[in-house]
Amino acid sequence: MDHVIYDILIIGGGINGTAIARAAAVAGLKVLLVEQDDLAHATSSASTKLMHGGLRYLERYEFRLVHESLTERGIMLRTAPHLVQPLEFHIPHNAQMRPWLMMRSGLWLYDLLAWRGHLPRSRSIALDDPVVVNAGRRGFSYWDARVDDARLVVLNALDAANAGALIQTRTRFVSATRGKDVWTVTLQAPGGDQVVTARRIVNAAGPWVELVLRSGFGQRGPSRLRLVRGSHIITTRCFAGDHAWLFQQPDGRIVFAIPYLNAFTLIGTTDEPVDGPHEAQISPAEEEYLLAAINRYRRTPIAPAQIVTSYAGIRALFDDGAGSASAVSRDYHLDLDTAGPPLLSVFGGKITTARHLAEVALARLGIKDRQTRHRPLPGGDMQDFAAFFEQARQHWPFMDGDQLHRMARAYGTCLAEVIGDARRVDDLGRDFGAGLYAREVDYLIDKEWVTTAEDILWRRTKLGLHLQAIQVEVLDAYIDERRK
């Protein structure tokens, strides 16, 4: 049915796949991306929501990875200022875990590797938070950034589509046959099987990368993949202030506590080896570990009943021979097979470095283009978010302040397209609860590949934390009717 020869077919709609699709489409290639579920439905919506350099990677001497990550953090702060926000972290000093001089030197090096990163430098501070146990009453402050991970994926896909890429969700890659110059690929889509041809294939299937190689390409051999589960809990707000916390643990790991959606605290993460993508559920032992990690530093312990929800994602890391799951490098590895039309498989990677990974991936495929370095993501063409939000308040005074702020963060300058010609609340259409109206739902269906309430509530927005089951049913029914 499709006689187009695509320059590149990408398998996987996570952060790596969509970033590569974006870079390729912007470079002028004819791109097809297929995703078996929703965009960011797996690992890429289950991160710690940080755009960071990885302070702890310095202990493993991964200086290049940290420098690259911090450089990318700076690029993302400039090109997606609505989505990527500076975030201050406080670290209580604990001499039994890491000496003062080691911590101060590590933070100084972190600052140095982020040279010209446009965020405040780290410093020593007095810590007198009455909630936090801190015998020495001193610690450190440093800066990184936070990001809505799933929306970052969607915005990469949206920019790719704006540049001419075809994004097909709910479409499963089945198999590929290598010809002299092109691949012949079978896809399973909602409307039936499709056969397409492509000059290059990128396997960016994340935790499924080796399964795709085996089942779709017939490749066999020893595994090069380490699957590691990272789990998080979301609790009722348990720390005051706009800053996050980094808590050192006796096992050498660190656990973050991050202000989340005003009323909550996001706590994570763990590093548990697993056998397959199907194990993306937090275990009772991990919940206990994360609660203990926080309660080690709290005067009043958090109770299990304060956990509102939890989530887990499977990191698909390249097996570098490290002994423990937490010691495996978070750096990416690109495997290029050129025995005919190229096949590039992506192992590992981080939310923070996805844009650069895409640059490198295209270069490995013989395509040199760096246009995304300065190209704003959709909605990111602004100088200052605070000024943009003030303009939005003046333009749409009828909207609730919290609702407008959430939408401004999610859509940036695309907000006008979402709200349209609405001049009063009634113009926004049906109210599904928690500030979600039909205007926004319609936009997400038309522009952002939404097919279910879950796509909206847990990936395009995080309003699933606020809606009741009956409201979700009503929303699902509306989406089904709207898509007919």
Image (cartoon, grey):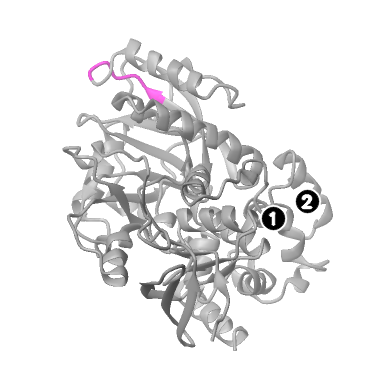
Residue 10 percent location from the top left of the image = 47, 63
Q: Is residue 398 visible?
A: yes
**Residue 151 image point, x, y percent:** 55, 56
Would you say residue 258 sits in the magenta stretch? no
Circle nearer the N terminus (1, 2):
2
Q: Is residue 399 visible?
A: no
Q: Nearer the viewer, residue 14 or 184?
A: 184
Left or right of 223? Residue 216 is right
Q: Quadrant of the C terminus?
A: bottom right
Tell me if residue 158 comes above or below residue 242 in the rendering: below
**Pointer 1: what residue?**
404
> Does residue 198 sit above or below 72 in this rendering?
below
User: How many marks overall?
Assistant: 2
Dot 2 crowding, Cα within 10 Å, few <14, some 14–19, many 20+: some
Mark 1–mark 2 distance (CA, rounded to whole Å): 8 Å
**Residue 93 lies in the magenta stretch:** yes
In the figure, residue 193 lies in which quadrant?
bottom left
Mark identifier at residue 104: none
- Determine whether label 1 and label 2 are within 8 Å by CB: yes
The residue carrying mark 2 is 393
